[in-house]
Amino acid sequence: MQSQLPMLERINLGELENAEARKDRNIALANVLGWLGYRNLAASWLWLELIQYYGDGPGRTLTGYGLAYDYFDHMTRLDPNFFLGYRLSSLVLAYRAGQPEQAIEILDRGIQQFTPETNPGAWRLYVDRALLNFLFLGDAQAGRDDYYRAAAWREQVGLPGDDFRQLGDNIARSPLSRRARFDVWMSVFNSTTDRDTRIFVLEQLAQLGTVLRTLPTGEIEIQAPPLPDFPDEEPYLLRL
């Protein structure tokens, strides 16, 4: 019976294509609002549209993320101070849409927009870019440089930075090691409070052989995978 068919089999592809066309028109309409002087309103509207677009799992399975870059591009041009928009670009463009170069383009726009003085959390943009350079583009030296810049920006707002410099040195020395990948994913987990991003990071850690266990307290125990030349470590206790 039709009601028993899997969700994807019950979706009308024509309706999805029409929905994509409507979203494309909405992006154009948001730009018109921006030209009329309602730039922040238009950017906020695109943000809500993007969240709905990203959250439509069945739709994205069938039609992909073809509009994702357009959302981020226009949203951050309409409101260059939309910090969360820059940060979410890594999750959507690189992790989901497979477009790390476009994600770096959006992050670079944010890095040019913010400083530690204007946003104390701006160092997180360099952490996001480090992961893209290291894990998605295979450029360990660029990843190291990004971690060094993140460290410098952290220190400008009174936060320690040496751990990020050490992480940058470690991945530059052993860019293909599981240890380097574990540490990079942990740096992303610790630099964001976005639940979807953290869940994605946990999935990547599990693929490395990391043992994950949810405790009665609600904390997640993260035990690093057994790695040569590293002693057994105490597990990390973190929360989503």
Image (cartoon, rainbow, N blue to C red):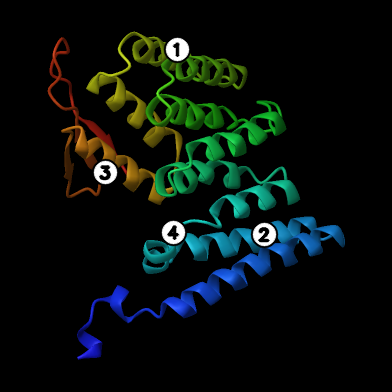
Q: Which residue is denoted by mark 1 in the rendering?
A: 165
Tell me the mark number nearer the camera, choosing from 4 and 3: 4
Q: Position of residue 60 (x, y in %)?
A: 42, 62
| Helix, strand or loop at mark 1 | helix
User: How many angstroms separate mark 1 from mark 4 (CA)?
Assistant: 37 Å
Type of residue at label 1? Arg
Q: What residue sits 34% from the left and 31% below the top?
A: 185
| Helix, strand or loop at mark 4 | loop
Lower sequence index among marks 1 and 3 = 1
| Helix, strand or loop at mark 3 | helix
Lower sequence index among marks 2 and 1 = 2
In the rendered view, would you say 210 is above or below 213? above
Asked if labels 3 and 4 touch by Cβ distance under 8 angstroms, the answer is no
Q: Which residue is denoted by mark 3 in the rendering?
A: 203
Tell me the mark number nearer the camera, choosing from 1 and 3: 3
Report which quarter residue 166 is drawn in.
top left
Label 2: how many Cα within 10 Å (few below 14, some 14–19, many 20+): some
Q: Position of residue 174 (x, y in %)?
A: 30, 12
